[in-house]
Image (cartoon, rainbow, N blue to C red):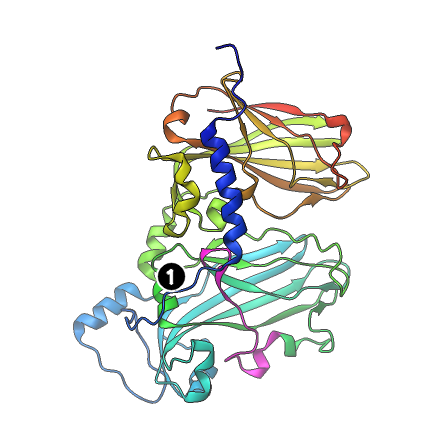
């Protein structure tokens, strides 16, 4: 026809739907109400009572539980609740960490236990029920930087989306000598970690029966939050995006998760918007171009089929019945200028088949943090582009027009310059 299609109606309406849906995300998804179903992985009782099981139940526990010797990571749970405590799952090498340029937070081990018949005083964290679950995590915080840093040490187990999660607790059911905020040397400043300071202690998560059952209906994530600063007002904290690790709660799920590809950490993945199936990926591309003194490198691409989770189907409805495909581009940015550059409001566009279509990046599916790259620093940016699956299948050529950078005043930086990358397809 001789005209460039700036954005198909499908893409435009989908982008608007994503924007509207994210506005509604403030209403956190609620867990189902009371659910009396019990897990099959009860292994060890810690109450002085003996729980007898049939041979069949013992075999099932042996297959599904990773409780090893059954040693209780946090004996205080039984002491404080006066309930029956049974190990459901133990992960001695979870490999969960968040390294914020030398300030490192690591989960060394965690354990899930089922608590039944607890005392009345312990019911509040379990939605006033006398049964529930506790996840105990052994956490090490080490300030490997050269100056004191403030950090609040918030972790979460994310369920259906980033507003539906189980928060960590440094105090509930944790023995006093293992509470990180109390065993620190500088007790007056509970969030201040001196240069070189290293602290290890326990944290807890409390789940109702229904919340534990919900783990099986989503792909739960374990997230160690950022928000690190050198001042007690947390000014210029520039929080770094934490990896959204798969939260393993049983052996069978662990086997299924182990065989999955390592998807880029866009919000389709981290916020449980959708499951993914890999179509094509390529890493180590290392195609570098420069805008003045800012070097932009395309490190890799992933093309994935997107299968919306139940809680997020509505936001993808305008893509029709053909399905959705996502292109996630991983970029490394080296800012060698004397000013920070913003990376959250870039005007990047994907040109398809020599301008047959032009597709805007979907900012609502891209990581929120970091929002900028400081002067003299390096950082990562993920760009995400969405397509109807039937249209994607006929496309042959993708050229990404990266930029321009936009300053805090809303004006283009570096005279509005852009660079173009030819992406593998």
Q: Where in the figure is residue 208, as x and y percent of width and height?
A: 39, 72
Residue sitting at the far left:
55
Q: Is residue 226 highlighted in magenta?
A: no
State which quadrant residue 142 falls in.
bottom right
Q: Dot 1 corresponds to which residue?
A: 215
Which residue shows up at 75% across the image and 54% down it? 236
In the image: residue 365, left or right of residue 115: right
Position above or below: 89 against 322: below
Question: In this view, which residue lies farthest toward the top?
Answer: 2
- Residue shown at 58%/28% (left/top)? 349
Total numbered circles? 1
Q: Nearer the viewer, residue 14 or 126?
A: 14
Side of 252 relative to 269 (left or right): left
Q: Position of residue 210 (x, y in %)?
A: 36, 68
Residue 10, image quadrant: top left
As drawn, is 416 to the left or to the right of 351?
Answer: right
Residue neighbourhood size for the residue with mark 1, other residues' Cα within 10 Å, grouped as few (<14), some (14–19), many (≥20): some
Residue 380 appears in the figure: yes
Query: On the picture, is 52 further left or further right than 334?
Result: left
Q: Nearer the viewer, residue 384 or 64?
A: 384
Q: Which residues are magenta?
A: 159-180
Q: Residue at x 69, y 41 (%)?
A: 378
Q: Secondary structure at mark 1?
A: helix
Residue 182 place in picture, x, y as percent: 64, 79
- Residue 124 horizontal/vertical position (percent): 46, 81
Q: Is residue 68 visible?
A: no
């Amino acid at each position: 026809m001789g005209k460039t299609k700036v954005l198909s109606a499908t893409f435009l309406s989908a982008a608007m739907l994503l924007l509207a849906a994210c506005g509604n995300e403030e209403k956190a998804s609620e867990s189902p109400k009371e659910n009396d179903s019990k897990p099959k992985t009860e292994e060890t009782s810690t109450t002085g009572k003996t729980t007898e099981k049939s041979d069949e139940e013992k075999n099932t526990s042996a297959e599904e539980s990773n409780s090893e010797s059954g040693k209780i990571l946090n004996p205080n749970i039984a002491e404080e609740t006066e309930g029956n405590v049974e190990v459901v799952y133990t992960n001695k090498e979870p490999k969960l960490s968040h390294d914020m340029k030398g300030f490192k937070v690591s989960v060394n081990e965690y354990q899930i236990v089922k608590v039944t018949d607890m005392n009345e005083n312990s019911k509040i964290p379990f939605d006033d029920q006398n049964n529930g679950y506790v996840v105990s995590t052994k956490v090490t915080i080490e300030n490997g930087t050269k100056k004191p840093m403030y950090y609040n040490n918030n972790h979460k187990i994310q369920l259906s989306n980033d507003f539906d999660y189980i928060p960590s607790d440094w105090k509930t059911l944790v023995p006093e000598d293992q509470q990180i905020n109390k065993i620190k040397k500088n007790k007056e400043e509970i969030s201040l970690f001196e240069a070189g300071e290293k602290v290890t202690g326990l944290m807890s998560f409390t789940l109702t029966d229904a919340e534990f059952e919900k783990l099986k209906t989503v792909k739960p994530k374990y997230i160690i939050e950022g928000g690190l600063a050198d001042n007690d007002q947390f000014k210029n904290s520039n929080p770094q995006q934490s990896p959204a690790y798969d939260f393993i709660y049983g052996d069978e799920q662990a086997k299924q998760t182990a065989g999955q590809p390592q998807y880029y950490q866009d919000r389709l993945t981290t916020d449980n918007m959708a499951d993914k199936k890999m179509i094509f990926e390529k890493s180590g591309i290392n195609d570098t171009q420069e805008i003045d003194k800012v070097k932009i490198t395309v490190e890799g691409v992933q093309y994935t089929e997107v299968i919306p989770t139940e809680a997020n189907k509505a936001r993808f409805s305008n893509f029709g019945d053909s399905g959705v495909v996502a292109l996630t581009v991983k970029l490394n940015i080296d800012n060698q200028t004397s000013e920070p550059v913003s990376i959250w409001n870039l005007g990047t566009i994907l040109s398809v088949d020599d301008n047959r279509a032009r597709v805007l990046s979907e900012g609502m599916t891209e990581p929120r943090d970091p929002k900028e790259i400081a002067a003299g620093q390096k950082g990562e940016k993920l760009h995400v582009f969405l397509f109807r699956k039937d249209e994607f299948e006929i496309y042959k050529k993708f050229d990404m027009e990266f930029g321009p950078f936009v300053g805090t005043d809303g004006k283009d930086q570096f005279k509005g310059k852009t660079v173009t990358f030819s992406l593998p397809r």
